[in-house]
Image (cartoon, helix red, strand yellow):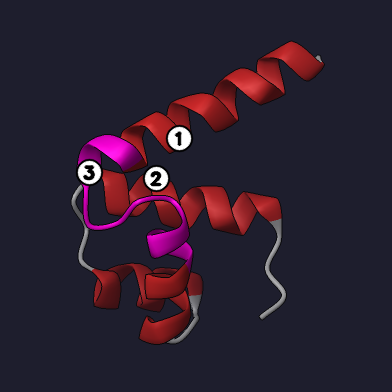
């Protein structure tokens, strides 16, 4: 599974917002299973962990600039 960091961030953000896996998969044109795996890496189904992952990714981008 080769996905870009932007796609990974979009998946995690959408899951953190409460969108279901099947919806996110349709939006990023991936299989439900792949979206679920990306979400699990970031803490899915715990929305608080997902939000922290999104926040951490945004801070890394700001610190790199």
Q: Please tell me which residue lies in front, 15 or 45.
A: 45
Under tag 2, what secondary structure?
Answer: helix
> Alpha-carbon distance for marks 1 and 3?
10 Å
Residue 59 percent across, percent down from the top left: 59, 18
> Alpha-carbon distance for marks 1 and 2?
6 Å
- Tell me if residue 35 is in the magenta stretch: no
Residue 62 percent across, percent down from the top left: 68, 15
Lateral position of residue 53 relative to residue 1, left or right = left
> Alpha-carbon distance for marks 3 and 2?
10 Å
Under tag 3, what secondary structure?
Answer: helix
Lateral position of residue 25 relative to residue 21, left or right = right
Residue 54: which disc? 1
Q: Earlier in the sequence, mark 1 or mark 2?
A: 2
Q: Residue at x 47, y 58 (%)?
A: 41
Residue 13: which disc? 2
Residue 19 percent across, percent down from the top left: 22, 58
Mark 1 vs 2: CB contact within 8 A: yes
């Amino acid at each position: 599974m080769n996905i870009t960091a932007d796609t990974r961030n979009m998946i995690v953000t959408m899951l953190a917002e409460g969108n279901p896996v099947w919806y996110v998969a349709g939006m990023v044109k991936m299989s439900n299973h792949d979206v679920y795996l990306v979400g699990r890496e970031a803490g899915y189904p715990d929305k608080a962990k997902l939000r922290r992952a999104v926040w951490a990714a945004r801070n890394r981008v700001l610190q790199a600039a």
